[in-house]
Image: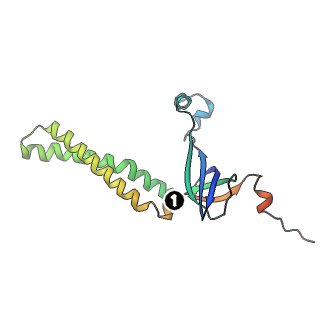
Amino acid sequence: MIEEKALVISSDSGIARVRAQRNTACGGCSLNKGCGVSVLDRYMGDRGATMEVIDPVAARPGDEVVIGIREDALVKGSIALYIVPLLAMILAAIAGSAVVAPWLNVSAEGASILFGALGLVAGLGWTAVFSRRIQRDTDYQPVILRVTGHDSLPERFIPITKV
């Protein structure tokens, strides 16, 4: 499970709207040196992300929570978003150059460009269909794992003491 802290903005019927601060993978930006992403951050502004998540813990607005998403869901989503359109573009460009161009007696370069663009559009179309299909699938949705922070602890946690 990949986890991230977030702040609950609103909550209703098992769905919460949260705001999470986006971070870079390497953590170099917190040092303001390294790969140069920190320079872009200064110009890009706020890096917060607002999203709806499944709320099985009945979080309240203002609660700090830990949200999570399954690793395999993130990997499958990344493949659908990046690899499928790219692979479709490359394979269609190769097919256009090697198969269609000689068959239609046209320029291999032109056929490669045209079919590569068509392959990219087809790959993006497949990604849109895949995205709609998994939109309500709970396996692909982020979920609130637990409430953290001191603001909500006294109300939710009543320690059991032995008398």
Q: Quadrant of residue 159?
A: bottom right
- The colour scheme of the drawn protein is rainbow
- Residue name at image x 22 percent, y 47 percent: 92
Residue 25 in percent (x, y) is at 54, 41
Q: Quadrant of residue 52?
A: bottom right
Query: Residue pushed farthest right?
Result: 163
Residue 138 drawn above or below residue 88:
below
- Residue 158 relative to residue 67: left or right: right
Q: Which quarter of the figure is the N terminus placed in? A: bottom right
The image shows residue 152 at horizontal and vertical percentages of 75, 56
For the question of whether residue 26 can be seen, the reply is yes
Q: Residue 148 in the image: x percent, y percent?
A: 71, 54
Q: Residue at x 66, y 63 (%)?
A: 58
* The C terminus: image quadrant: bottom right
Which residue is label 1 attached to? 141
**Disc 1 packing (10 Å; few <14; some 14–19; many ≥20):** some
Helix or strand or loop: what does disc 1 sit on? loop
Relative to 68, residue 21 above or below: above
Q: Is residue 13 left or right of residue 112?
A: right
What amino acid is at disc 1? Gln
- How many marks the image carries: the answer is 1
Instruction: Report the residue at 62% width, 34% height from top.
Output: 30
Tell me where residue 137 appears, x and y as whole percent: 47, 64
Q: Nearer the viewer, residue 75 or 132?
A: 132
> Measuring 52% from the left and 32% from the top, which residue is drawn there?
44
Residue furthest out toward the bottom: 163
